[in-house]
Image (tube, grey):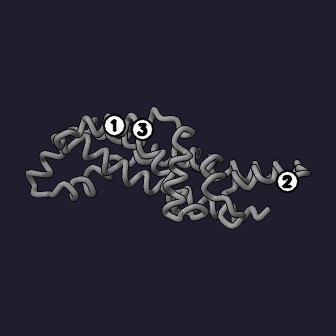
Amino acid sequence: IPVTQQLINSTIVTVGAVGLIVAVSATGGFAFAKLGFRGSSVVLLLILAGMMIPMQSIIIPEFVNISQLGLVNEFLGAILVYAALGAPFATYLMTTYYRGVPTEIVEASVMDGASYWQIFRKVMLPLSLPAITTVAVLQVIQIWGDLLVGLLFLQTPEVRTITVGLATLQTSRMVNVPALMAGSLVSALPAIIVYLIF
């Protein structure tokens, strides 16, 4: 099996999806926690309701949507699906974190003439690095080890992730157990390293 290419594919999908999830959840969490726009509690409730929907129940409509966009067997398609699945929990976590940051910091920044974008970028973002790291680590572990989305949205051998590659190796007529075990170890190492470092 082309393990190196599959590891590169997994890295592209994981980094892209985690980057998108962090960007959406950090900005959304700041807006929900500190900007207090009209209807924000209802919108947050709808986002949280997204956490309660099992992935298996929405995977077919997602596949139809992604195929209509022509993004099946494209990294972008898998990245968008992973981002849509991971964003509700990440937004909830970031909102909770930002609510713990004193509002006086935002008010003082407004008094100093900073815009909300400057407050977010220069004040809140540095303060929220622990929460961002938590979101990133949890999502890396989730996305790296996921099989279902990769199996459906990245079907051709050129774009397969390492998890899908191992699954297809296992379903062939003869199972090469040493190769399967070695591949499993190689597949698990990046997620373990990310977890241990962060």
Judge depth for marks 2 and 1 and give the one in front. 1
From the image, tell me which residue sits under label 3: 50
- Residue that badge 1 annotates: 46
The circle on residue 163 is: none
Tell me which residue sits at (21%, 58%) in the image: 118
Mark 2 or 3: the one toward you: 3
* Residues marked 1 and 3 touching at CB (< 8 Å): yes
Vertical side of 108 occupied by 69: above or below: below
Between 89 and 114, the residue placed more toward the observer is 89
Secondary structure under badge 2?
helix
Mark 2 residue type: Ala
Q: What element carries label 3?
A: helix
Distance of label 2 from label 1 (alpha carbons): 45 Å
Q: In this view, does 61 lie above or below 48?
A: below
Q: In this view, does 195 lie to the left or right of 116?
A: right
Residue type indicated by callout 1: Leu
The residue sitting at 55% across, 49% down in the picture is: 140
Contact flag, marks 2 and 1 (Cβ < 8 Å): no
Question: Which residue is pictured at 82% across the width and 49% down the height?
Answer: 171
Residue placed under numbered mark 2 in the picture: 179
Left or right: 105 as drawn, with respect to 52:
left
Write the residue at 66% across / 57% down: 161
Q: Position of 34 compared to 132: left or right?
A: left
Amino acid tagged 3: Gly
Q: What element carries label 1?
A: helix
Cα distance in 3D space between marks 1 and 3: 7 Å
What distance separates the C-alpha of mark 2 from that of mark 3? 39 Å
Coordinates of residue 129 in the picture (x, y in percent):
38, 48
